[in-house]
Structure formats: C-alpha cells, structure tokens
C-alpha cells in the first residue's frame, strides 16, 4: 500500500519538475527577448559607428555637405566631427542642471517637511503632471518665454530652460523620496543636541541622503542628454562651436537629426549615436554604483 | 488623589509645577508636579500610553515637534522656566538618549561624539575637541574599545556600543540633565547591564531622568520613581519605598503585575 503511495507521489513530483522546467525556460526566453533590443542597438551602433570615431570626431566641427559628399563619393571616411554638438550639449546640460538642481532640491525639502499640507500636495501633484508633459510642449513654452522675449532668437539659454523644466520634477521627487527614507530618529538626535532646524537639514539630512540625491541628479541628466524635440524649437543648432548663451547652439541629438536629413552625412549618425549612448550608459552605471555603495 | 510627595527635595534641579500637555486637546500629561533631585536617577514608569514619553520630551521641548501641541504649567531648570528660554539653548543643557541607538551614519565615532559642537558650528581647538571626545568616551566606558578606531564609522559598532556612543554624544556638552527614553529596550541583556552600570556611575556628575518599561530596571538603578497612569502622576517617591510599600493601590497593582 505504502509503496504505491510513494510511486504516486513520485509521479506527481516528476510532473511538477517538468512544469518547473517549462516555466524556467519561459522565463529565460522572455528575459532574452527583453534584453535583445538593447544588445542589438549597441551592436548596430558599434558596428556602423566605430570607424568614424577618432580624435577628429571629438574636436572638429561638422563638415559641410560638399565635403561629406566628396568623401562619400571617393569611398573615404567623412571628415570632421561633432565638437559643436558635444560642446553645445555640455553647455546646455550644465546650465540646465544649474537651474534645476537647486530649485529641485529645495522644493523636495519643502515637500518632505510639509507632508500632508495643502500647498505641498498641490506642488507635488503639479510636479508629477510636469513630468508627464511631452518634451516638445516644454520646448514650445521655452520658445515663447525665452526665444520670443528674452534672447530675441534661438539660443542655448532657451534650450537649457526647456531641459531644466524637464529635469525639475525628477529631482524634486528623488529628493523627497530620499529624505523620506532617512529615519526620523536621526533628525531627533540632531535636534536634541540643540541644532537649529535649518542646520539639521543642511548638515544631517542632506549628507545622509547625499548618494540618493546624486543618483537622482545623474538620472535626470542622463534623461535630458538625449532630448531632441525641445531643442529643435529653442537651441535650433549651429555648425560652429558656440559658447554664447544667447546664440543658437548645436547639441548631439540635434546633429543626429540633421545628419539623418542629409543623405551625404548618414555615416555620422551611427558614431554620434554611439557617443551619446556611451555617455548615458556611463551616467547610468555611475548612479547604479552609487546606489550599490549606499547599501 | 494627585501626588504623593514623600520625596521632599531641597534645591531641586528640575521642578515641574502643574505641567499639562495636550495633543489636539487630548491631555497626555495632566497636572504633574514633581521636584527632581540633583545627581540622582529618577525613573518614570507606567503602562503604555500613560504619557511618560511625552513628559520626558517636554523636559527638553522635543514634544514641540509634534503638531497642535499645547503646554500648560511650568517647568523650571535651576529655577528658570524652560518654556521661556530658547529651545536650542535648553537642549544643550538637557542631553537626550533615545530608544534605539541613532549615531549619525555619515560620521566617524570621533565626529559623532563631537557632533553637538560641529553641527552647531561651535568653534573649538583640536586639543579641546580631543579632550572632550576622550572624556565623553571614557565616561561611557567605550574609550578602551574604540580608541584605535575613532575614525571608523559609528554605525560599525554593536548595538550596545552604539547606544553608549549616543550617551557619549549627549555627555559631550556636559549637560545638567540627561533624559533617557527607554535606552535599553533595543539591547540584549549584557549590553543592558553595561548601560545600567554606567547610569549608576554617571549620576555622580549628572542628573538622569529615565523612562522605562522595565520595572526591575527601575528597581535596580533608580533612586526615585514616578508612577504615571493615564497622564496623571499617581505616585512619586523613593524607589525603595515605592517598591516595598506603595501608597496608591494602582501603583501596587502595576508593580505586582496585575495590569500594565
């Protein structure tokens, strides 16, 4: 009697093992499907783009159509590089960060300190809505505010403002969430030492949540690094390196769009995309590293 | 019904006169009048929700962090009303130790001890700082354990060591009173015993007010005890007398484990 029971249970278990294997197989296949696009993208960018990457690519301005056409006709590499785009991207990202980081962190602190208050709830909701606003709309707004009224023309400043607005809600949220994770007991410990409230925030809460704040900022930067739509309406583009905030300026994603529209420059699309991807990947890895260290 | 004033105290360091504290008009502490003697350990006992933590926090005005709080009556530290002095100054005279050890995770052991000076921006010479750190860590019997790792993070220490570090942090200002809110409730028995020994030694130089859930702890280390129930002070007296011969029937019931 007993032996039959054992046999039966073995039967059951082999069925379960089979199911287990099937599910495991499905999980592996689906995971592969998930990661395959990113692998294929990077593969394509590397294969098509690596030949154009050189020192010139980083320090030369974009070639004109004629130079590119001649090179393509002779089967040579397209001369020149995307230095104007690299400089423009750095310039606008730095200014956008300078605008968004202080405002975002202060707003985040405000939200953390006033949990449940009417103003804080409204601010949080508006910030969340802002995160969902299409980037081209932010470009339009910046066009109306800055291009039409302040710089009287397309400008790096206008581009930075639209990027800063994009970045703002991410920093607000990450600051608030980071501060919320800090135990109340630390705040109490500092207050019980007679530390004034503003110093508790500046010298205890912010240092304790520092890595969280930095992670939020890095993710925000990597988000705006590849933004194209708002820049089309604000920074416009430029074939030269430009450091004047009130003048039209290029950016890497803008150049990719320009190369796409010029049949002679198509060869540069891949290398520019590769560079942009590499920058964003590095930022993401750095922020992952910071999060890992924090634990 | 109110207070049993067996403990007649001359020159009290702390005196509470008719102190009441309410959250949203619900009284958590009702008309408490107590005089606390210098260089003693005074235990506040009572069942959960009796207002003992609120009373303790009212002594360094940490209760004001909660919203909609009202405080009536007065509390005098060496004859001065604490509700009329700046809270920030008061807290430097009233060290506080919490239930769970809470060293600052970004700071080294050394910086944790000196944190009160650092965070307040009080300038001190390096020699003075070194001296304060060593004195405070010696006071809590932690110096020998950590003197070779002063610049490691305070959070690497064990729970009991962290709690002693937090006591050292409170001692660094040489406060007059140290308020402790169940300081051993998160610790194991050995760490608890160390802290208890420490408190008995510390009362030579400081006055300690201790909230505790643990009656035997109160019996072991306190000189005076307050028994609170539903926000009222039921009984106040020498710990020995209270444990051997409680006056109020509620105290007796609590001490004999009939409720609580």
Image (tube, coloured by chain):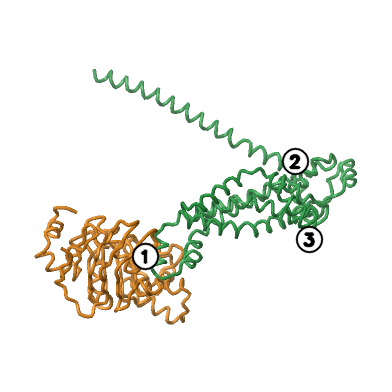
Chain colours: A green, B orange
In space, the residues marked 1 and 3 are separated at their CA atoms by: 53 Å
Residue A138 vs residue A127: left or right? right
- Of badges 3 and 2, the one in the foreground is 3
Please give left or right for residue A207 compared with residue B7 in the image.
right
Please tell me the numbered disc located at residue A244: 3
User: Does residue B198 appear in the picture of this structure?
Assistant: no
> Which chain letter matches label 1?
B
Percent from the top left, x then y, of residue B204?
24, 78
Of all residues, the one furthest to the left in this rendering is: B245
Tag 2, which secondary structure? helix
* Residue B47 on image: x %, y %: 22, 56
Q: CA distance from mark 2 to mark 1?
A: 65 Å
Of circles 1 and 3, the one toward us is: 1
Picture quarter with the C terminus of chain B: bottom left
Q: Which mark is residue A78?
A: none
Q: Which residue is mark 1?
A: B62
């Amino acid at each position: 009697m007993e032996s039959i029971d054992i046999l039966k249970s073995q039967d059951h278990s082999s069925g379960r093992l089979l199911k287990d294997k099937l599910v495991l197989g499905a999980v592996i296949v689906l995971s592969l499907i998930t990661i395959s696009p990113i692998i294929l993208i990077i593969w394509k960018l590397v294969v098509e783009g690596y030949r154009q990457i050189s020192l010139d690519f980083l320090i030369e301005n974009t070639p004109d159509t004629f130079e590119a056409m001649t090179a393509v006709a002779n089967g040579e590499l397209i001369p020149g590089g995307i230095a104007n785009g690299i400089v423009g991207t750095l310039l606008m990202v730095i200014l956008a960060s300078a605008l968004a980081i202080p405002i975002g962190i202060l707003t985040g602190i405000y939200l953390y300190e006033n949990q449940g208050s009417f103003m804080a709830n409204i601010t949080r909701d508006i910030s969340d809505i802002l995160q969902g606003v299409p980037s081209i709309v932010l470009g339009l707004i910046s066009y109306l505010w800055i291009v039409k009224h302040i710089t009287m023309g397309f400008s790096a400043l206008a581009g930075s403002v639209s990027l800063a607005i994009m970045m703002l809600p991410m920093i607000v949220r990450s600051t608030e969430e980071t501060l919320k994770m800090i135990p109340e007991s630390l705040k109490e410990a500092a207050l019980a030492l007679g530390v004034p409230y503003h110093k508790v925030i500046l010298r205890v809460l912010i240092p304790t949540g520092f890595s969280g704040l930095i992670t939020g900022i890095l993710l925000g930067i990597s988000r705006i690094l590849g933004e194209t739509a708002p820049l089309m309406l604000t920074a416009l583009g430029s074939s030269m390196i430009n450091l004047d905030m009130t003048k039209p300026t290029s950016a890497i994603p803008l150049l990719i769009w320009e190369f796409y529209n010029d049949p002679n420059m198509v060869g540069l699309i891949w290398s520019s995309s590769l560079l942009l991807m590499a920058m964003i990947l590095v930022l993401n890895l750095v922020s992952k590293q910071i999060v890992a260290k924090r634990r | 019904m109110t207070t049993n004033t067996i403990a007649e105290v001359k020159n009290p360091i702390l005196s509470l006169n008719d102190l009441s504290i309410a959250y949203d008009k619900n009284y958590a502490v009702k008309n408490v009048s107590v005089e606390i003697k210098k260089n003693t350990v005074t235990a506040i006992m009572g069942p959960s929700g009796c207002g003992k933590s609120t009373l303790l926090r009212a002594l360094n005005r940490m209760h004001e962090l909660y919203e909609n709080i009202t405080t009536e009556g007065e509390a005098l530290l060496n004859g001065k009303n604490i509700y009329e002095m700046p809270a920030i100054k008061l807290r430097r005279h009233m060290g506080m130790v919490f239930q769970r050890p809470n060293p600052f995770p970004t700071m080294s052991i050394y910086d944790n001890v000196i944190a009160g000076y650092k965070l307040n921006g009080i300038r001190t010479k390096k020699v003075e700082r070194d001296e304060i750190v060593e004195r405070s860590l010696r006071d809590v019997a932690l110096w020998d354990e950590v003197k070779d790792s002063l610049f490691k993070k305070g959070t690497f220490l064990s729970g009991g060591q962290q709690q002693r570090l937090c006591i050292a942090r409170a001692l660094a200002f040489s406060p007059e009173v140290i308020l402790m809110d169940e300081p051993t409730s998160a610790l194991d028995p050995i760490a608890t015993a160390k802290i208890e020994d420490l408190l008995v030694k510390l009362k030579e130089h400081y006055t300690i007010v201790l909230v505790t859930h643990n009656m035997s702890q109160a019996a072991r280390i306190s000189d005076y005890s307050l028994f609170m129930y539903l926000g009222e002070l039921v009984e106040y007296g020498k710990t020995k007398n209270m444990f051997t011969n409680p006056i109020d029937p509620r105290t007796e019931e609590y001490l004999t484990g009939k409720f609580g």
